[in-house]
Image: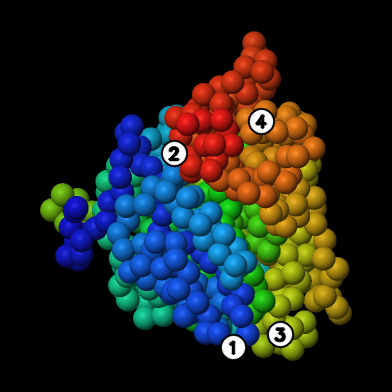
Amino acid sequence: MAKTRRGRTRRTLPRAGGGRQPVVEAFSVVLQPAPGRDALAVARDIARRVGLAGWRVEPVVEAGTEVEIVPRARSVGAARAWDITYALRDQPEVVHAEPMFRYLVPENAPPQLRRAVAARADDPATDTEFDWSLRKTAVFDAWRLFGSSPPGAGVQVGHPDTGYTLHPELADSSRLLISAGYDYDDDDPDPMDDMNDGFLDNPSHGTGTGSVILSGVGAPSGGPGPYVSGVAPHALLIPIRTTESVVLFSMRGLRRAIDHASTHGAQVVSISLGGPFPGFGLRRAIQRAVEGGTIVLAAAGNEVGFVVFPAAFEEVVAVAASNIRDEPWTGSSHGPAVDITAPGESVWRARTVRDQNGRMSFLVERDSGTSFAVATTAGIAALWVSFHGWPSLVRKYGAANIARVFREMLQSTCRTPRGWNTDEYGPGIADANNLLETPLPDAVPARKLRDSRRAAVATDTTGLETIVHLFPDVPRTRVEETIAELLHVPDRDLPLILQDYGDELAFQLVMQPRLLRALTPARGRTARAGRLNVKRGLSRAGLSSRLRRQLGQR
């Protein structure tokens, strides 16, 4: 165990093979108790039945029909987690149950751990134009539309990330609603970033993304710079510490942060976090937020060929990244699930550094990633809500429709550079001025899905659509053939079998990138060889006893 600078005991996760294995933080359970029975009492009874006596049962919704069963210690590995999940699903009152993991997302690792990113230099074109990203999204023109009104005023932005620091780019703007935030990583009212700089930590990540949303305009000291100009400088930020590292994705932490943001009045939620495995409990929290009138945006992902979750969920605005030349950032995730693109390469942002003596240095530097693209777009969402007024939007469309109206207008008013690949990076680059100048529609636009696969993932009960989503360059038939062979079933029986084991199989695949690569077409490798590699890899994975039997393993 290690001590944080605030004297807390910092949790560490089990290591295996030099990396960190996924561990369970909770089990998400949806119940349908018999009429007249108390849902929480039923949940506690279910926990006892499956051998979880003494574990905490915490309600997620007031009625108690959705709960989380929390282990007494973080020592539940993947194999046991799935065995417990199946036992929970076997209970007659349980509609759905799933494990909520904290797991490693290597593509979000700091630059020193990612050779591909470390080899890239900052774009020289951004050397002295510190607010180029605002120019490229027409934010300066949008500000002029406010007249004497402060751009972004009256809007609260929920910000699940690594917490805040008292960087002048944020603290001097007096826009941090610290008392409205929370630290779900350390269970503490103060969401301040602990600034631990361990192997997988991302100290100051929340400070950086938050500064892009609403830092003050120009240099705080009045000097020449560098400086950060936030997109919505008069909005308010609710910092919610979800994790000490964006490399370690906490499904439960993000679920709690989204519920926290929406219940504390956030009209916008900006998520610069994500991972390759979806979560039913996480998606339900997003749905609750959207139904309450919150616009939820998330980063499309870095260094992988598919859009990560929660950005891939239908209810979320998925944001890819571009550069100063109006080209996609080469590290940006892409695909039909992308809704919009915004500047994310060589974007100036705030950064706080702590030396060995505990002294803090407050810097402004460039960084790249879809984290900054979604922060830019969240700032634009805050401008849009501020410009029209949230109460007026609710009266006109109803709270549950605000996010849909915003997404449709964001896409229809964007700027499409010449040669832009609309199939992979959305219809274009966000244009704040055009968005605000365009009159609001008279009615809520019809629901539109640009990506049929995204819709399939949203309603997937087998895990198959999630697996297909992870292989954008592999024919669907090859994926299905591989899975059927692994499970020793005919193709026609695959959907039925996956009703039981599909989500665990998807989880095992995404936790082992080498297995994903084995299924990807490569020169000199046959599809048969790829399937054999996957089978060998799964034989060494921490599988549940049920899936192991289905795969023919002892």
User: In the rendered view, does 525 fall on the left or right side of 75?
Assistant: right
Q: Quarter of the image holding residue 418?
A: top right
Element type at mark 2? loop
Element type at mark 1? loop
Of the numbered discs 3 and 1, the one sitting upstream in the chain is 1
Q: Which mark is residue 36?
A: 1
Q: Nearer the viewer, residue 201 or 74?
A: 74
Of tags 4 and 2, the one toward the viewer is 4
Q: Residue at x 67, y 76 (%)?
A: 291
Q: Which residue is mark 4?
A: 488
Q: Residue at x 68, y 43 (%)?
A: 497
Give the CA separation, mark 4 to mark 2: 19 Å
**Could you say where residue 495 lies in the image, as x and y percent from the top left?**
74, 44
Q: Which residue is mark 2?
A: 542
Element type at mark 4? loop
Instruction: Give the class, few, some or many, for how many residues have Cα within 10 Å of label 4's Cα (few <14, many ≥20).
Output: some
Of tags 2 and 1, the one toward the viewer is 1
Give the CA separation, mark 2 to mark 1: 40 Å
Q: Which residue is mark 3?
A: 394
Is the Cβ of the residue at disc 3 closer than 8 Å to that at disc 2?
no
**Could you say where residue 105 lies in the image, as x and y percent from the top left?**
46, 44
